[in-house]
Amino acid sequence: MSGHPEMYVDTHCHLFWDDFREDTDAVIMRAREAGVTRMIIPATNLETFEQARAIAERFEGVYLAAGIHPHDAGEVTTADIETLRGFLSHPRVVAVGEIGLDYFYDFCSPATQQRILHLQLALATEHGLPVIIHNRESDEDLIAAVREHQDGRMSGQFHCFSSDVQYARAVLDAGFHISFTGNVTFKKSVLDPVLSYVPDDRLLMETDSPFMTPVPHRGKRNEPSLLPVIARRFALTRDQSTAHIADITTRNAERLFQLERKQDS
Ligand SMILES: [Zn+2]
Ligand SMILES: [Zn+2]
């Protein structure tokens, strides 16, 4: 047993969401008290990047990802991609994200989603940044896209992982990290085998706030202070201590997103 409290990084929380507008400060203070001292806010489009940036600039330990979510890929112009490129040099930006494919909803066609994804994967390579990948019912096209851009240097996070062990193996082989949310605590979850399968050095944690609220807080808004609840499920399923979970996931987040280097900026 270590004497000091466990520390966590919430690698995916949408603190710009309307749900947080009234009490952002309290949410961040509560997170810190729970040991969640660092958070990454992935934008979903240009507008939400500006909102996320305003939060990150007010709080230490809050980082940003800039990207266009597949839900928002429909109306993207060349000028938008240029604006996004400019955002990537903000000192708190640690990744291109969140980007990806979502075939569950049809806000825009798979072809358009793929076009915008490829442009952003290229931007990540250009800037030497990791990517934060959103995947919903698009396993095959997504792994094909990242493989196409994998030149031995690309890294990133498959966030809110909900596929099977076989897909996890493909994602790991492609050089990526795997991240789970409160979905691992759901009664209907079938994620235990894949949660056990991911090796220590590729595992990440996230809340995906305000979504994916873990059991037993279902029905309420999710927030970063609930990350330790997810850690307990990681510990149980993987037969490891929560201290170990906190330690490995923190180190992985620091290494993948180079948090130390961005700390004082
Ligand atoms: Zn997502
Ligand atoms: Zn998200």
Image: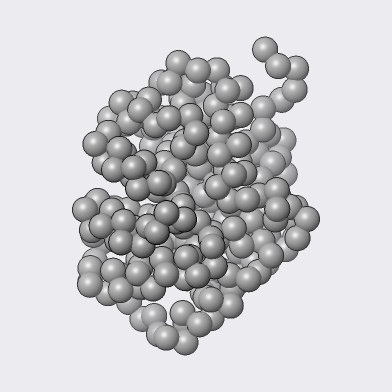
Q: Residue at x 54, y 51 (%)?
A: 13
66 shown above or below 224: below
- Tell which residue pokes out farthest to the front in this image: 152
Report if residue 187 is visible in the image: no
Image-based side of 94 in relation to 58, left or right = left
Name the image quarter holding residue 160.
Answer: top left
Where does residue 73 sit, x and y in percent of width and height?
35, 73
Label count reads 0
Q: Which of these two is toward me, 229 or 170?
A: 170
58 and 26: which is toward the camera: 58
Residue 263 position within the rendered picture, expressed as x and y whole percent measured from the top left? 73, 52
The image shows residue 231 at horizontal and vertical percentages of 52, 28
Residue at 47% x, 87% y is 79
Up/down of 65 relative to 13, above or below: below
Residue furthest out toward the top: 1
Colour theme: one colour
Outermost residue, right side: 264
Q: How far across and how far down the image is residue 42, in percent? A: 52, 58
Kindly identify the residue that appears in the image at 50 percent across and 18 percent down.
240
Say if residue 247 shows up in the picture.
Answer: yes
Q: Which quarter of the figure is the N terminus placed in?
A: top right
Locate the C terminus by quadrant: bottom right
Q: Residue at x 27, y 33 (%)?
A: 165
